[in-house]
Amino acid sequence: MNISTIRRIGIIIAVSASLTTYALGQNAASFNEDTRPQESQPGTTYDTTLHTYAARTRLSATFDVGMGFHNASFQALPEAPSCCSGYSSENGSWLGGALGMERRIDGAWWAGVDVGVTGTSVLFTSNQSTTFIIDDEPTPGSFRFEQKVNLTYLTIMPKAVVDIVGPFRGMIGIGPAITIGTHQTQKETITEPTSGVIFTSGSSTRNASDGSIASAESLRWLASIGVSAQFHIDRDHVWSLQPQIGWTAMLGRPIDVDKWFLHTARFSLSLLWAFDKAPYRTSSPLFSW
């Protein structure tokens, strides 16, 4: 390689570096430019449209808890005796986590998706009347049948989010879910008469079953629906927090049941990372303060 060739390469590198430095300087200047409307001067026209740099894409990690499951329609339970249809749920819990992404599509509107795993635990009960044989005599009585079902879901929820006013946002989403783990226990307890009838020696309670539901029967698809009100803290920063209060429902047949509709109020906390910013023209919420 002769000296003239080396000199040409050096000139090319120097010119490239100069152009790159100039481009970066122009970009920095445009990013930090004064976006306030200019005062009109006689004979001069200014573009007074506000331009602002804001998050365009955010990644999120969410942890949520819920209590107070309610059952709207539940016809039968696996391995439940034929006497015991018409169950009601007394209590339940919800614990989950999700990773998500949201991207601004137009002004105050965002579109995204959350992928997560959720665990639910629900207790179903049924009080039934029956006849017991005590001392060879038929005796009216009743018993309480309980079934506790633990389910683990994998959920994929496309969502729409809107910046309403200030830090307040709203979200609605609907998507598929599938049960990836199930476990159930059931118990029968004599309630009437209070004595004289036993299932096992010395006890008026027995466990009817305790075990895992067959995996072939448990891998069922459901629909997951969620809505929430969100409060976005430090929304203009790269890292931000977002507590939210919402409602979630599961519909479908996660196990051998005729109908399944569970819903719960839930509280969530999200950590968001805005890794992508871009200029937006009047990218304000739906309503201003």
Image (tube, rainbow, N blue to C red):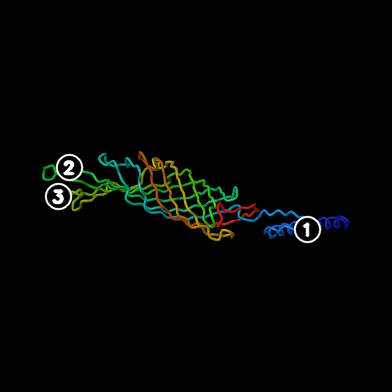
In percent of width and height, residue 115 lies at 50, 49
In percent of width and height, residue 206 lies at 24, 49
Frontmost residue, 213 versus 48: 48
| Residue position marked by numbered label 2 in the rendering | 131
Three-letter amino acid code at disc 2? Thr
Per the model, the C-alpha gap separating discs 2 and 3 is 13 Å
Mark seen at residue 196:
3
SS category of the residue bearing label 3: loop
Three-letter amino acid code at disc 3? Gly
In percent of width and height, residue 38 lies at 70, 58
Evaluate if marks 2 and 3 touch, with contact meaning CB atoms under 8 Å apart.
Answer: no
SS category of the residue bearing label 2: strand
Evaluate if marks 2 and 1 touch, with contact meaning CB atoms under 8 Å apart.
Answer: no
| Residue position marked by numbered label 1 in the rendering | 17
User: Can the viewer see residue 179 in this picture?
Assistant: yes
Q: Horizontal placement of 17 versus 32: left or right?
A: right
Three-letter amino acid code at disc 1? Ala
Per the model, the C-alpha gap separating discs 1 and 3 is 96 Å
At 17% from the left and 42% from the top, the residue drawn is 131
At 38% from the left and 44% from the top, the residue drawn is 261
